[in-house]
Amino acid sequence: MEEKIKVQINNLAKIYPNGDGVKNVNLEIKEGEILTLLGPSGCGKTTILRALGGFLDVTEGSILINNEEVTHLPPEKRPTGMVFQSYNLWPHMTVEENLSFGMKLRKISKNEIKRDIEKMLAIMSMSGSEKKYPNQLSGGQQQRIAIARSLLLKPAVLLMDEPFSALDAKIRMQMREELKRIQAELNITVVFVTHDQEEAMSLSHRIVVMEKGLVAQVGTPTEIYDNPESKYVASFIGEMNFLELEGEQVAFRPEDVLICKQDEGEHIGVIQSVMLLGHYASITINTGKHLVKAFIPRNKTQNIQEKQTVSFTLNKSITYKKGA
Ligand SMILES: Nc1ncnc2c1ncn2[C@@H]1O[C@H](COP(=O)(O)OP(=O)(O)OP(=O)(O)O)[C@@H](O)[C@H]1O
């Protein structure tokens, strides 16, 4: 089956009066995918999301949703829903009232509203919370209700701006799982913004890595982890070692360092520290010029000690020209 393109962003630019912003953004978002905009603070993630939602005037380019141009439509005329970091539920309204508000404005019948809310609360694992007020719910539960409120209006695309960053680590992980489940169940298209690479890796079908207002790379989590196209992407996603060798930069992951017998390896160094981290150990090797991090399976750590000279090879590495 051919994949349907849900959102098309063509040559988008948004330049603020001070010269900051984003430019040359070209993206196709497929129906039923979670696409994550990832990058450090200020790289332009929120700007793209807000452009999709209609919350700002773009400087250049166009946005199509379901093949229809929406570039100059206000938020309420777009088939998008937005979920923010702060849940933005109305504190004086019950869950049911919060959820039904937008549906009533759309003149949906009472029976349909009731039925849809019941169904949605079940999907969100929140059945029975209709009469509760937001302050009687945990942060994670409030965010579920905020997501439910957006989804009840059946947006073509759900836009999520760091929706889990106010939650504590454990709930955050749970919410990732939940979002993936709900997204698959309803086959919704999601554009998700985060600066947390682990979050992006764990929940996205594809990731857009941003760098200073530009798209640095687009790919599946595996593509981006295994084949980062630039040094920037390589150092931003996961842990990466860099060795400078003959004018080139050789990049490799800690799990791709293989400790060898005596001097059989390509590189030599002295073990500076050994840290046991459950099923593996994290080892720092000082080559004299660089500190190299290596992850070694626990069963291979018996003969490894601090201050010992070791040699190592690289299972896999990527070479970048200087300045790339
Ligand atoms: N209203 C504005 N006026 C002027 N400059 C702005 C405005 N909004 C954002 N910027 C600038 O545009 C750039 C991109 O900002 P944006 O908020 O999109 O980044 P971000 O990646 O979402 O960052 P964060 O993770 O901190 O939210 C930044 O340099 C920011 O300072």
Image: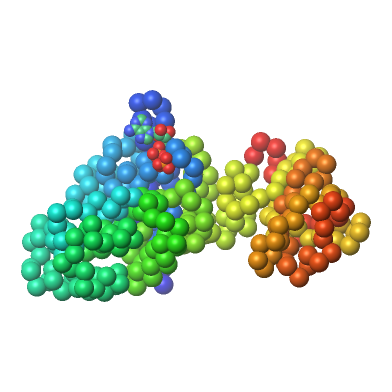
Residue 97 visible from this viewpoint: yes
Residue extending furthest toward the right = 263
From the viewer's side, name the closer residue of 272 and 150. Answer: 272
For the N terminus, the quadrant is: bottom left
Please name the residue shown 32% across and 43% down the image: 51
Q: Quadrant of residue 99?
A: bottom left
Relative placement, left or right, of 66 versus 35 is left
Q: Residue furthest top?
A: 18
Ligand 1 is located in which of the four quadrants?
A: top left
93 relative position to 198: left or right: left
Colour scheme of the rendered structure = rainbow
Viewer-side residue, 49 vs 148 = 148
Q: What is the x, y in percent for residue 202?
A: 49, 62
Quarter location, residue 257: bottom right
Quadrant location of the C terminus?
top right
Q: Nearer the viewer, residue 320 or 4?
A: 320
Please give the count of numbered marks on the rendered protein.
0
Residue 177 lies, in percent from the top left, at 42, 67
316 vs 125: above or below? above
**For the point 80% across and 46% down, which residue is it?**
286
Which residue is rendered at x = 34% and y = 50% of the image? 85
Q: Relative to residue 280, is residue 65 depicted above or below?
A: above
The residue at the point 9 percent across, 73 percent down is 111
- Residue 91 is left or right of residue 161, and the answer is left
x and y percentages locating residue 192 in the rendered image: 39, 54
Residue 44 rendering spot, x and y as whole percentages:
42, 40
Q: Can you see residue 67? A: no
